[in-house]
Image (cartoon, rainbow, N blue to C red):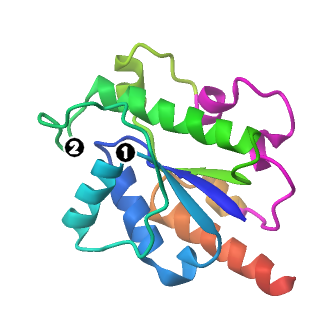
Amino acid sequence: MTIALTMGDPAGVGPEVVVKALADTQLAGLARWVVVGDARILEMAEQSTGLELAFKDVHHVGTLGDLADFHFGRLDARCGEAAVEYVRIATEMCLRGEADAIVTAPLNKEAVTLSGRQFSCWPASGFRRSTSPRMCRCGRPARFRRRASCARSSWGMRRWFCWASSIRASRSAV
């Protein structure tokens, strides 16, 4: 299974969450992960966490342009625009059959709004183009269950690990 993993807000926790999650060899081995985002930001997140990804399957999106004034933790309209663009590109990958599913790192609603876009939720941002049932699974049915506790939790590591354990549980049942 190929999963398009969007980086979320480049200035937020998303790049760090992506690096930490995919540095886990058990999680990384569950699928073919394609990180959709800015490769330069991903490298900065690797440096700040002290972790390095074993693979470099990154669909680079250069929406941010020059990074001379970029800083993690700073609210920036460019980052909001980039986060939405990552979701759009991941959606297009699913619709073309290049990915089977999408997982997104956290978006910053305020940054998205500063970019001039109206923010309601990430699926509405990315899946506005599709009215098919693929909105949730993006193609052939995935073989994992989402636990109710994960669906209600906030974004962050808890959601990632609940999601990963759900995949592990369903794979062992197959």
Graded by Cα atoms within 10 Å as few (under 14), some (14 to 19) or many (20 or more), the crowding at tag 2 reads few
Q: Assess whether residue 118 is covered by the magenta stretch.
A: no
Work out which quarter of the rendered image holds the N terminus and state it.
Answer: bottom right
Where residue 93 sits in the image (x, y, percent)? 66, 42
Task: Relative to 171, say whether 58 is above or below.
Answer: above
Residue 41 in picture, x, y percent from top left: 29, 49
Q: Earlier in the sequence, mark 1 or mark 2?
A: 1
User: Is 93 or 169 nearer to us in this picture?
Assistant: 93
Query: Is 157 placed above or below 69 here?
Result: below
Residue at 28% across / 58% down in the picture? 43
Q: Position of residue 150 (x, y in %)?
A: 63, 60
Q: Quadrant of the C terminus?
A: bottom right
Q: Is residue 27 left or right of residue 94?
A: left
Looking at the picture, does residue 161 appear above or below residue 150? below
- Tell me which secondary structure the magenta stretch mostly adopts: loop
> Residue placed at 37% from the left, 18% from the top?
115
Q: Which numbered marker is on residue 38? A: 1
Q: Quadrant of residue 52?
A: bottom left
**Separation of residues labelled 1 and 2 (CA atoms):** 16 Å
Q: Residue at x 44, y 35 (%)?
A: 83
Residue drawn where x is 86% and y is 39% of the image = 133
Magenta region, residue range: 121-147
Assign a secondary structure to mark 1: loop
Q: Amino acid at mark 2?
A: Gly
Q: Is residue 1 left or right of residue 158?
A: right
Q: Secondary structure at mark 2?
A: loop
Q: Which image quarter: residue 110?
A: top left
Residue occupying the far left of the picture: 68
* Disc number for residue 73: 2
Q: For the residue carrying disc 1, how many other residues have a C-alpha within 10 Å: few (<14), some (14-19), or many (20+)?
A: many
Q: Nearer the viewer, mark 1 or mark 2?
A: 1
Q: Amino acid at mark 1?
A: Asp
